[in-house]
C-alpha cells in the first residue's frame, strides 16, 4: 500500500500539472490593449492592484492623469491583495457603498476611502469598484487574471514590490517583498491584457494624493520609445494622458541603426506627430515635444536615459521588452537586477539617483496562437504555463531573463537586416 501510494502520487501529480492549465480559464481571443482599443470604446477599463496602503497615492496620481472625461470616462477596479498563510480559505470580497461586507473588509477601509474621495472629485468621469482578494501568494495571480478577464480590463496596474521610496532614493521593502515580487511576475506571465508595473519614487504620504487633486500645476510625462509592441503601448497610454489640460508629454525616440523599425512602430510615431500638429493649432498653451536621438551602443543609450533623470519629469513611461540581440542592450541584461522592469526600467529604477519621478513599465498583451509578423525576437515568451520561482543572484557571471530564470551571458552580435527578417518570421 505504501509503495502504491508513492507510485500514484509520483505519477498523477505531474500528469495533472501537464494536462491542466489554470491560465486557460481566462484566455482571450481579443487584444485587450490601449493601442488596439476601438474608437467606439467609450471608456477606459483598468484594474489597479494594491499591496499596501502606501501604494494608494501613486495610483491615484496615475489614474488622474489618465484623462477621465464625461465622453471617455475611466472605469477602474481597485483590488486589495492580502496574502494568506497556512490553510486559510481564500476570499474574494466585493465592497458596496454604505454596506460592510464582512469583518475582513476593515483591512481595506483606508484604501477604499481614498479611492472613494478620488471618485467624488471626478464625479461623472470616474467609476470605481473596490474588491479585496485574500489568497496565498502562489495563487494570488489567478484572482487578478480572472478579474481582468471578467471586467474586460485593457491594462492591469501593479505596484513594484518595493513599497515606497525615501527622499534620498533608498527603497523600503516589505517583509514579504520576494513573495510580492513573485506575484507580479506571475501576473506578467498570465494576465489576459496589458500590464503596467508602477515604481513610485515620489512622496508616499496619504495627504500627497489629496494635495495633488487640488493642485493645478503642470504634470510632465516622458516617454522613451525604441521599438516593439511594449513601446507602442506606452506611447498609446501617453497619448491619452496628453489630452488632459495640465499634462505635457515629451517623447524621446532612440533610433537604433542595427534594427529596422516595423511598420506598426512607424505608424504609431506618425500618429503622435499628427497629434502634435493638431494640438499646436489649438489655443491652449500646453506644449508636447518629440525628439529623435541616434544611439550606436548601450553607453550612448544610458547617457540619454541618465539625462532624462536630471530633467523635471513627474512620470516616465517605458516598454518592458526589446530586441534582445541589439547592441543597445548588449551589456544591460548582464546587470539587470529586476528583470520584471526590463533593461531600461531597471536603469531608471536604480537607487543611485535623487530624482523623485515615478516610473511605469508597460508590457503589451499578446495572446497565444497569434503570430505578429512585425514583432522581433524578445527576451521572453509571450505566455508561459508554469508558475514563477524567484531567485536573486548578485554574481554577474550570468544574468536573468525577463521572467526571472537564469540564462547564460549573451555575446553581442551585430544584427543584419536579413537576420532581423528571419527572426521576425520565426516569432
Image (spheres, helix red, strand yellow):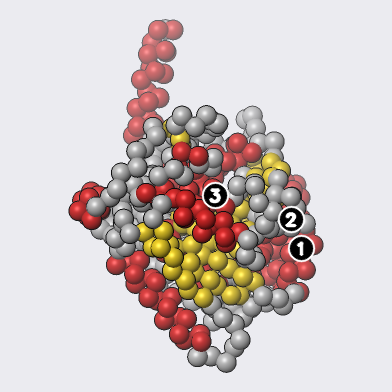
- List x then y, in percent, for residue 408: 39, 32
Sort mark 1 into few (<14), some (14-19) or many (20+) by Cα contacts within 10 Å. Answer: some
Which one is closest to the eye, mark 1 or mark 3? 3
Which residue has dot 3 on it?
A: 347
Taking depth in this image into account, of 363 and 258 the one nearest to the observer is 258
Taking depth in this image into account, of 164 and 27 the one nearest to the observer is 164
Taking depth in this image into account, of 102 and 401 the one nearest to the observer is 401
- List x then y, in percent, for residue 53: 72, 52
Which residue has dot 1 on it?
A: 208
- List x then y, in percent, for residue 84: 64, 37
Q: Residue at x 52, y 34 (%)?
A: 390
Element on which disc 2 rests: loop
Instruction: Work out how far the residue at label 2 is from the one at label 1, CA to CA, in angstroms.
Output: 7 Å
Sequence-wise, the earlier of marks 1 and 3 is: 1
Which residue has dot 2 on it?
A: 204
Sort mark 2 into few (<14), some (14-19) or many (20+) by Cα contacts within 10 Å. Answer: some
Q: Are marks 2 and 1 in contact (CB under 8 Å)?
A: yes
Q: Are marks 1 and 3 in contact (CB under 8 Å)?
A: no
Q: Which mark is residue 246?
A: none
With 258 as the anchor, is 342 left or right in this view?
right
Q: Residue at x 59, y 88 (%)?
A: 284
- List x then y, in percent, for residue 216: 72, 77
Amino acid at each position: 500500500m505504501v509503495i502504491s501510494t508513492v507510485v500514484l502520487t509520483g505519477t498523477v501529480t505531474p500528469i495533472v500539472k501537464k494536462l491542466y492549465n489554470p491560465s486557460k480559464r481566462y484566455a482571450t481571443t481579443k487584444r485587450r490593449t490601449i493601442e488596439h482599443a476601438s474608437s467606439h470604446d467609450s471608456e477606459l477599463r483598468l484594474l489597479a492592484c494594491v499591496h499596501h496602503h502606501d501604494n494608494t497615492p501613486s495610483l491615484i496620481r496615475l489614474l488622474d492623469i489618465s484623462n477621465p472625461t464625461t465622453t471617455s470616462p475611466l472605469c477602474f477596479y481597485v483590488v486589495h491583495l492580502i496574502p494568506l498563510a497556512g490553510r486559510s480559505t481564500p476570499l474574494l470580497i466585493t465592497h458596496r457603498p454604505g454596506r460592510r461586507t464582512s469583518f475582513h473588509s476593515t483591512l481595506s477601509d483606508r484604501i477604499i476611502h481614498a479611492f472613494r474621495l478620488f471618485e467624488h472629485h471626478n464625479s461623472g468621469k470616474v467609476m470605481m469598484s473596490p474588491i479585496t482578494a485574500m489568497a496565498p501568494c502562489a495563487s494570488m495571480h489567478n484572482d487578478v487574471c480572472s478579474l481582468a478577464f471578467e471586467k474586460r480590463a485593457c491594462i492591469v496596474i501593479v505596484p513594484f514590490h518595493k513599497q515606497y521610496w525615501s527622499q534620498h532614493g533608498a527603497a523600503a521593502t516589505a517583509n514579504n517583498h520576494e513573495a510580492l515580487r513573485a506575484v507580479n511576475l506571475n501576473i506578467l506571465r498570465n494576465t489576459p491584457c496589458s500590464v503596467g508595473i508602477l515604481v513610485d519614487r515620489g512622496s508616499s504620504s496619504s495627504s500627497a494624493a489629496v494635495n495633488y487633486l487640488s493642485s493645478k500645476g503642470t504634470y510632465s510625462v516622458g516617454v522613451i520609445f525604441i521599438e516593439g509592441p511594449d513601446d507602442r503601448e506606452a506611447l498609446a497610454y501617453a497619448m491619452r494622458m496628453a489630452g488632459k489640460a495640465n499634462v505635457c508629454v515629451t517623447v524621446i525616440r532612440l533610433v537604433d541603426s542595427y534594427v529596422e523599425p516595423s511598420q506598426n512602430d512607424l505608424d504609431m510615431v506618425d500618429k503622435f506627430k499628427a497629434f502634435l500638429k493638431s494640438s499646436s493649432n489649438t489655443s491652449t498653451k500646453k506644449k508636447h515635444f518629440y525628439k529623435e536621438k541616434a544611439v550606436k551602443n548601450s553607453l550612448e543609450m544610458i547617457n540619454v536615459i541618465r539625462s532624462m533623470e536630471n530633467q523635471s519629469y513627474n512620470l516616465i513611461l517605458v516598454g518592458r521588452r526589446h530586441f534582445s540581440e541589439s547592441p543597445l542592450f548588449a551589456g544591460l541584461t548582464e546587470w539587470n537586477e529586476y528583470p520584471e522592469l526590463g533593461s531600461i526600467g531597471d536603469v531608471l529604477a536604480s537607487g543611485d539617483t535623487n530624482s523623485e519621478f515615478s516610473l511605469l513599465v508597460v508590457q503589451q498583451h499578446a495572446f497565444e496562437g497569434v503570430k505578429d509578423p512585425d514583432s522581433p525576437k524578445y527576451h521572453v515568451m509571450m505566455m508561459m504555463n508554469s508558475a514563477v520561482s524567484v531567485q536573486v543572484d548578485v554574481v554577474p557571471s550570468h544574468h536573468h531573463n525577463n521572467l526571472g530564470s537564469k540564462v547564460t551571458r549573451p555575446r553581442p552580435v551585430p544584427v543584419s537586416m536579413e537576420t532581423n527578417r528571419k527572426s521576425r518570421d520565426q516569432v
